Image (spheres, grey):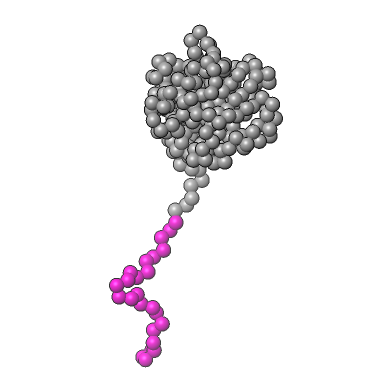
């Protein structure tokens, strides 16, 4: 009608006019594959494998593979809150598991000796677990004190290559002849340790120990001290 006022809003000068609404894509019923199937089945979203449960599954498998007799003296370097230490202690009814750490909260939250001992008590193995404050590069133990030395993603936290190699030397020193070194670390570091001591076998631990993907996987170094 003549004289009527339109109520239709017009876009202001210099602004875009409203566009048509786009149709949303339907959600995928299954997640995308991140890096292919991998050796242990579907390796979708490999970042999820960096959970404590994933690491424990790997270490249970490796400790089973080690076939401990049950009376060994075991040392865990950089034990933290005791995940590997306590798992190993459960296999040592007449042995002992000793963990050493500098208890840095930067490397692991709630990293304190009392937390580790409380975790050992909760697992029912406090009678065979001991923890000490010690530097991996200067272990306070005599030569040949242990049957097994383990370490899980700890040695790489030492900033210099020289001191990392020193920690590996110390681990070998406190092993008895025929004793075993079992170290899990990021693959460049694990190869560095093997090159330094001039022996040992290296084996990738698979997607359960990936950090974001296979480009930062973890490798296990297994070495036996010569008799």
Query: How many dots with numbers?
Result: 0
Q: Is residue 187 above or below residue 18?
A: above
Q: Position of residue 103 (x, y in %)?
A: 54, 36
Using the rendered view, name the quadrant where residue 18 is placed: bottom left
Image point 65% across, 32% down: which residue? 120
| Left or right: 39 as drawn, with respect to 66 | left
Q: Is residue 5 above or below residue 166?
A: below
User: What residue range appears in magenta?
Assistant: 1-24
In the depicted view, which residue is nearer to us: 140 or 221? 140
Residue 218 sits inside the magenta stretch: no
Q: Position of residue 127 (x, y in %)?
A: 69, 26
Residue farthest left in this picture = 14
| Left or right: 227 as drawn, with respect to 124 | left
Q: Is residue 219 above or below residue 226?
A: below
In the depicted view, which residue is nearer to us: 17 or 56? 56
In the depicted view, which residue is nearer to us: 142 or 51? 142
Image point 46% across, 36% down: which residue? 211
Our reading of the magenta stretch's main secondary structure is loop
Residue 11 sits inside the magenta stretch: yes
Residue farthest bottom in this picture = 3
């Amino acid at each position: 009608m003549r004289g009527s006022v339109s109520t239709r809003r017009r876009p202001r000068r210099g602004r875009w006019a409203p566009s048509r609404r786009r149709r949303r894509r339907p959600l995928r019923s299954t997640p995308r594959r991140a890096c292919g199937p991998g050796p242990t089945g579907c390796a979708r979203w490999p970042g999820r494998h960096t959970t404590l449960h994933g690491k424990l599954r790997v270490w249970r498998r490796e400790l089973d593979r080690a076939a401990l007799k049950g009376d060994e003296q075991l040392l865990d370097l950089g034990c933290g809150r005791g995940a590997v230490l306590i798992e190993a202690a459960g296999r040592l009814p007449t042995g002992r598991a000793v963990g050493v750490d500098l208890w840095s909260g930067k490397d692991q939250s709630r990293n304190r000796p009392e937390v580790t001992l409380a975790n050992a008590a909760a697992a029912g193995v406090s009678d065979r677990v001991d923890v000490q404050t010690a530097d991996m590069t200067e272990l306070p133990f005599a030569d040949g004190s242990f049957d097994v030395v383990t370490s899980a993603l700890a040695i790489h936290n030492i900033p210099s290559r020289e001191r990392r190699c020193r920690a590996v030397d110390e681990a070998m020193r406190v092993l008895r002849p025929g004793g075993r070194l079992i170290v899990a670390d990021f693959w460049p570091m694990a190869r560095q340790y093997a090159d330094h001591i001039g022996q040992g076998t290296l084996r990738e631990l698979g997607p359960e120990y990936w950090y974001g993907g296979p480009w930062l996987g973890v490798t296990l170094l297994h070495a036996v001290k010569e008799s």
